[in-house]
Each structure stands twice: as structure tokens, then as C-alpha cells.
Image (cartoon, helix red, strand yellow):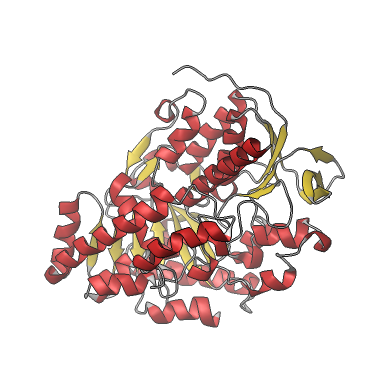
Amino acid sequence: MKRPIIKPRSPALVVGAGFGGIATALRLRARGYRVTLVDRLPELGGRARVFRRDGFTFDAGPTVITAPFLFAELFELFGERLEDHVNLLPVEPWYRMLFDDGSRFDYGGTMADTEHEIESLSPSDVDGYRNLLAHSKKLFDKGFTELADQPFDSLSAMLRSVPDLVRLRADRTVWDVVSRHLRDPRLRQAFSLHPLLVGGNPFTTTSIYCLIHFLERKWGVVFPQGGTGALVGALGDLMQRVGIEFRLGETVERVDIVDGAAVGITLDTGEALDGSPVVMGTDPCFVYKHLIAPDHRRRWTDARIGKLRSSMGLFVLYFGTTRIYPEVAHHSILFGPRFRGLLEDIFEKGQLADDMSLYLHRPTATDPSLAPAGHDGFYVLSPVPNLTAAIDWTIEGPRYAEKILDRLESTVLPRLRNHLVSCFHVTPQYFRTELLSHRGAGFSVQPLLTQSAWFRFHNASEDVRDLYFVGAGTHPGAGVPGVLSSAKVVENLLLERERAA
């Protein structure tokens, strides 16, 4: 493909080098802006940064890649092809669900594969799954295909969607919708899991997020050879080729505002960078509370932000083993003895429970090069309360890590401690101090109906002109497809601004 001609335009600033910031920087560059990308971390990736220790490559954050066309689009903007730079490998099964009663459910592959697995657990639920998937497609057609890249920056935009949302019963929760189609309690858990991947409680998250079922069915689940970090690296190389400037390891002190409009940023060193638009890939709660003076905030005051319900926190344990566990799938979900009760402890009570449900990631199942020869690499994630809970993670962190190792050793990784190497963990404190996430939340604000679309942080700031937001905290929401789509929303808003100029 021929590389398009980029016409010169004004300087633009993007703060935050996660997937949202990277995608925005590329989209703005393709429109001719002279883009500077700023991040306080020393490397690209944000939540998708990489930890390298003792020959192991640990992806720090996102490990489930769906809707890969959203990455392909970024290369196509400049006449290039994603597949020339990153090899995306299919993951089979997409997830292995391990229930507390000892039963197992492999989810993914063909429709026939999934139906066979459902039939092995509950034959009467096969038709229910088909109906659930049909409903998921309707939600997908509306919530993803039609609305994911469109701004909800006006009440009229929200009101135009209300009839469809009412028809699709967006007022119901994910758990409500799944339970209407499936009877087996294990399958209800399995198909209510997806909100946890974007920071929500299935018992309170709007059923719009049931669209993820069809999204996975449409494009499957893939994994970049070399890890998610290889995808970040390929995007970084692309940014360098097209002339985007990086300012890594530099912290923004404030957004500079003149006559109600963002005109640049000031770093903590005192250096000022001029540019417009200013696009923030940082948690909007943090930006409004810490980077914008109160006299510039009419809507997003500290009091209003304080009333928002943040997502749960995350405890993530990274480790390697000196043996290979070939029977462990790439993605495994280990359900504990409780489901609703555990989620109430996490989201409502702020309690660190003794039991747990775990997501175990074994990337070496798909790409053995991520560990030394004869070794396996893992990360295990446990949803936990965010920092609104009175938990001292300096004390509880090591204890909780031991509890997780106990659980893994007694289930899927026998004699784990005999083979354990390169073991370390992060807590919600890491998300607050390193990633600047309000309350140490793993996914910004919860995906409640009252915190979605128009009710979520707008992609175009209501308080400051020429200030925009991408990432998990704004529309359309968390998860890699949502974050990448938020960059498309900002691009569309800027196109509207250009037409109006």
C-alpha cells in the first residue's frame, strides 16, 4: 500500500502512552498534526507495559486481544499492514473455566465446539446459549458497530439512543440477562464473567456489556507472538516512522488553560509544552482532581468525582517455573466456592475475602519464547477491593500472594513452590502510584448504566475547550476494544471541530 501524504498542521499533545494514547497519537498524526506523546513511565504501553526478569517476559496488563482490526486500522492509516509487523496467534480454547466442584468448561473455538462443551455440563442449556448469543448480536450491532466510535458529548445524542436501549433492556444487568437464558449455575458464572474484564460487577453492570459474547465469536481471541508487549513495540516503531515525538519518563504537572481552552501542559520540571488539542489518556478522575485547577471545573468538581463508583482493584502475581505445565491452558479462570458473595465482598463491603476467584495467564502455552527453555511463565490476577477499603497492602500483599500460591498449588500447578522463580506482585497501590488511577481502581469507573455513554466522562471535556479524553474512564469504556475505539471518538470530534471552524 502507498503511504498517504500527511499535510502539516498545528502541534497536538497526547498524555499517556497506553493503547488509547498511542492510537490517538497515530490518528492525529495521520490527520497532519505534529504530535508529541508524553508519559511518566520510562517505556511505552501504560497498563500494557512489560516486565522482564531472569529471562522471562511478563506482560503487565492486557492479555486478551479481541477485535484485532482496531490495531490493523492504525497501520492502514499510513499505508502499512499489521501482519507485516506482528504475528497474531489464535488462542484455543479462549478460556478454560475450572469450577469449584471439579468440573471444567472450555469456551471458544467453533460454535459446535462451544455447544458440545455446554451439552457436557447441561444439555438443556444449548438452546439457551443460542438465544443468548442472538441477543448479544443485537447488543453488538447497536453498542459496538453503531455507537462505539461515536461521541456521547450531548444529551440529545443519548436521547436518540434511548429507544433502542429500552428495547434491548439495557436496564437489566449482565447477570439478569444471562440467567434468563441459562439455568446451570456454572454456565451462568461462565457467561457472566466478562464485566470483570472491564471493571464491573456482573450483578450491577448494564447488560450492554453482553455484547462481548458476540464480539469474541466474531473475531475470536488472539495473542501477539512475543506477547502484548510486541504489539506495543510495533506501534512504537510505527510512531517513530511517521514522526511522532516521544517524551517518556516525564510527568505532567498541570494542563495549561487560557480563556477556558487547553493550550498546552507544564511538566514537573517547569518546562511548558504548547499544543492544541490536548488529549489525556490518563484516568479522568486524576486529571480533573490534580491537573486542572478548581476554578476551571464547573461539572467535574472534587465532590462530584467523589460520588462516582470506581471499579474494583487488582492484585497481580507474576512468576515463572522451572518446569512446564502443558495441561494448563493459555487463559484459565478458577472459580471459588462463592460467586455473588465474593463479588459483594469486593465491590460493596470492601473486604479481602479468604476465598478467591482467579484468572491465570500462561502465555507460554502459545508462545514458549516468553520464558527460558524448559520453563513456563505466568501471571495470575485476583479481583480485590480498591483503595477505598482499609487494607494495608504492605502487610496484606505478601500474605495474599501466599494464599494465591496455595490455591494454585492445590489445583492446577502441583508442587508449584518447588519450581517457583522470579515471583513478584503488584497491588491496587501500584495502580494509584504508577498508573495514576483514582482509588487504585483497575479500570477507572464502573460500567454501571448510570456511568455509561453520556453519563460517563465525555471524550470532549465539558469544562475545558480543546481538552479530550481517551482510555478506560471515558466512552465507550474499558477493555482493549473500548480503549482503541475511544481514540476514534476523539478523531471524529476533531473532524467536527475542523468543519465548524
How far from the left and from the top, in percent, is residue 297? 76, 62
Q: Is residue 189 left or right of residue 429?
A: left
Q: Residue at x 51, y 32 (%)?
A: 234
Image spot of residue 422 (x, y percent): 52, 53
- Whether 341 is drawn above or below 250: the answer is below
Which quarter shows the N terminus? top left
Q: Is residue 330 visible?
A: no
> Where residue 85 sits in the image (x, y, percent)?
45, 28
Tell me where residue 465 appears, x and y as whole percent: 73, 49
Left or right: where does residue 382 sit relative to residue 460? left
Question: In front here: 400 or 219?
Answer: 219
- Residue drawn at x 64%, y 68% is 439
Instruction: List the single residue furthest toward the right.
Output: 270
456 lies left or right of 121: right
Q: Residue at x 14, y 59 (%)?
A: 116
Rendered-image quadrant of the C terminus: top right
Asked whether residue 222 appears in the rendered view, the answer is yes
Note whether 70 is above or below 259 in the view shown. above
Residue 356 is drawn in which quadrant? bottom left
What count of labels does the image hold? 0
